[in-house]
Amino acid sequence: MTTATKTKPAFSPDQVSVVFVLGGPGAGKGTQCEKLVKDYSFVHLAAGDLLRAEQNREGSEFGELIKNYIKEGLIVPQEITLALLRNAISENVKNNRHKFLIDGFPRKMDQAISFERDIVECKFILFFDCPEDVMLQRLLERGKTSGRSDDNIESIKKRFKTFKDTSMPVIEYFETKSNVVRIRCDKPVDEVYKDVQAAIRDRL
Ligand code: C5P
Ligand code: MG
């Protein structure tokens, strides 16, 4: 007979408060998170930024793999992203910072399940809902100066496909648990931010 070991998450939601910030590429997740960081005491952890930092870290055994996945708009195997997030959260908790905006994560169902099982349950999800043509224009504009290997039309198309096929099911899963706040973001940054602030006010 085998006995299943039930592991507890590393933190309780009373100790560590996590808001997942989701939405398609170019929806404005990073922009809104920056504004929230200025006005509230959140730590902003962007999964894509953590992956790019790991890609560029000298001696990283995952550099080449991350580079290829990002260029192809594919989701990097969860073990890598989860380890980066877990480290970043632990470091911040050591420094008495307990409120996190986790931007661009979870992007795939396995990440959602593993994070909440092993690290902490999220408080709620901010979902930036944006039409694809608006996201496309923003990404092409950003691509003029971002230097990102995936802000070009070929990669963007792949990222949109991954979002639809792999990431939307994550949002639909959280919707069944009724903790998704959907925010329309095909309007000016400051108008979107008013809706974001209202969502935060009601829920934190
Ligand atoms: O969020 P951002 O657009 O910066 O992510 C860039 C890329 O990083 C994604 O297209 C994907 O290849 C990778 N990524 C991932 N898993 C995540 C977040 C980002 O594989 N949870
Ligand atoms: Mg971003």
Image (tube, grey):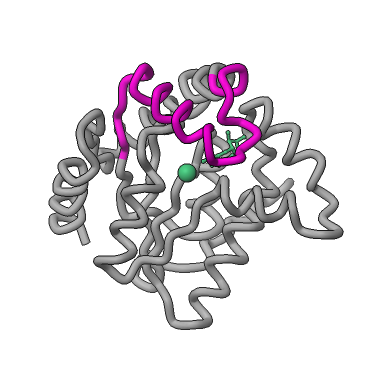
In the rendered view of the protein, which quadrant contains the C terminus?
Answer: bottom left
Residue at horizontal 37%, vertical 67%? 99
Residue 182: x and y in percent read 24, 35
Q: Is residue 55 above or below residue 147?
A: below
Residue at horizontal 39%, vertical 57%? 101
Residue at horizontal 53%, vertical 32%? 143
Q: Is residue 191 above or below residue 153?
A: below
Residue at horizontal 40%, vertical 62%? 100
Q: Main secondary structure of the magenta part?
A: helix
In this rendering, does residue 104 appear at all?
A: no
For this rendering, which residue is in front, 90 or 14? 90
Q: Is residue 166 above or below residue 119?
A: above
For this rendering, which residue is in front, 77 or 74? 74
Magenta residue check for 77: no
- The residue most toward the front is 144
Residue 178: x and y in percent read 25, 38
Relative placement, left or right, of 98 versus 7 is left
For this rendering, which residue is in front, 169 or 5? 169
In this rendering, does residue 107 appear at all?
A: yes
For this rendering, which residue is in front, 28 or 177? 28
Highlighted magenta segment, given as a residue range = 127-156
Q: Report which quarter residue 148 is drawn in.
A: top right
Magenta residue check for 143: yes
Relative placement, left or right, of 157 versus 28 is right
Residue 62: x and y in percent read 80, 47
